Image (cartoon, rainbow, N blue to C red):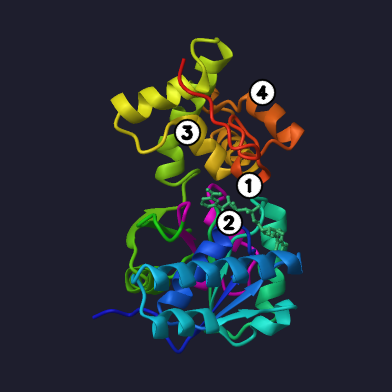
Amino acid sequence: MSNALTTSSIVAVVGSGAMGAGIAQIAAAAGHTVKLYDTRPEAVEKAIAGIRKTFGMLKEKGRMTPEDADAAGGRLQAASTLGDLSDAKLVIEAIVENLDVKRQLFADLEKVVAEDCLLATNTSSISVTALAAKLALPGRFVGMHFFNPVPLMALVEVISGLATDAQVAARIFDTAIAWGKTPVHAKSTPGFIVNRVARPYYAEALRLLNEQAAAPATIDAVMREAGGFRMGPFELMDLIGHDVNFTVTQSVFNAYFNDPRFTPSLAQQELVNAGFLGRKSGRGFYRYDDGSKPEPE
Ligand code: NAI
């Protein structure tokens, strides 16, 4: 029997960037009232407007009934303070990938939400055990790791830290299924499953670039067309965001006691320093602001 959160339960999403907006979209489409919070109110407004536009497009394409699309759009609410999230039954955090900032947020959230509210993090690489360690009720804390773009990617890693209550992980697992996703249970290890296994995919591509073996567009085309990957490593890093991708690599590198296999790339650090974060800033390995995309050489 499914133990998923009932649709009458309010879901809160903290952080309304790329991931938070995607998570809010699927939770609202699944029937929940969703409250979005961000330290930048304009990010919440942008996310809600973007999701409603998406529901409108799905309506036009006949992939959502007009009633469902309008109702889902109407279930999105902007929260202007953390206190507005007090009636949530599940809070999913998708803020900056930083242990101290996330810990502070969850400490603040614990003062606001009820004892039966589940707390989930969408962290890509930070230890779920470490994030839970200072909480008053660490058993209700779990990783719920979505992939980008959330509405299209089926996988959700449900991450248990040492203190996570097994029933909480099971509830999140069932909830992911109710939201149309394909969850998998994993323990809290650096990078979990996907971000651990994917590190060498980015790292070797960045080493190839460093050695001037081939241009990013060539490497991407080879991995896509001959390797069978849906996206090449450079276009994927541009989609993820170099700030996020670089931080995840640093975090995995540190967590494995500076294992050289996970050494972060100086070239990627330069992109971050320049603010060339990928699609979201208009420029990364490719340009998105002028519509050009280099062809393989
Ligand atoms: P993003 O940069 O698009 O959005 C982060 C949002 O969090 C921003 O709007 C920012 O204003 C807000 N924020 C920062 N500190 C905050 C705080 N203390 N309280 C409330 N809001 C705050 O980042 P993105 O890509 O959405 O990533 C968010 C999280 O999801 C990170 O932990 C990242 O590692 C993880 N993640 C990212 C994936 C990706 O492909 N981008 C994939 C899976 C997980």
Query: Is residue 135 in the magenta section?
Result: yes
Is the residue marked by circle 3 packed among few (<14), some (14-19), or many (20+) residues within 10 Å?
A: many
Relative to residue 23, is residue 14 drawn left or right? right
> Which percent across, then down, holds residue 285?
59, 29
Marks 1/2: CA–CA distance = 9 Å
Marks 3/2: CA–CA distance = 21 Å
> Which percent across, then down, holds residue 240?
54, 44
Q: Looking at the rendering, which quadrant does residue 12 occupy?
A: bottom right
> Which percent across, then down, holds residue 267?
65, 23
Q: Which residues are magenta?
A: 124-149
> Which percent across, then down, holds residue 20?
57, 63
Give the residue pinned by disc 2. Answer: 18
Give the residue pinned by disc 4. Answer: 266
In this view, which residue lies farthest toward the left?
Answer: 1
Mark with earlier residue (4, 1): 4
Vertical position of residue 10 compared to residue 64: above or below: below
Asked whether mark 2 lies closer than 8 Å to ligand 1, one says yes
Asked whether mark 1 lies closer than 8 Å to ligand 1, one says yes
Q: Amino acid at mark 2?
A: Ala
Give the residue pinned by disc 1. Answer: 280
Q: Amino acid at mark 4?
A: Leu
Q: Looking at the rendering, which quadrant does residue 268 occupy?
A: top right
Relative to residue 234, is residue 31 drawn left or right? left
Give the residue pinned by disc 3. Answer: 199
Disc 4 versus disc 1: nearer the observer: 1
Disc 3 versus disc 2: nearer the observer: 2
SS of the residue under disc 3:
helix
Q: Residue at x 35, y 57 (%)?
A: 154
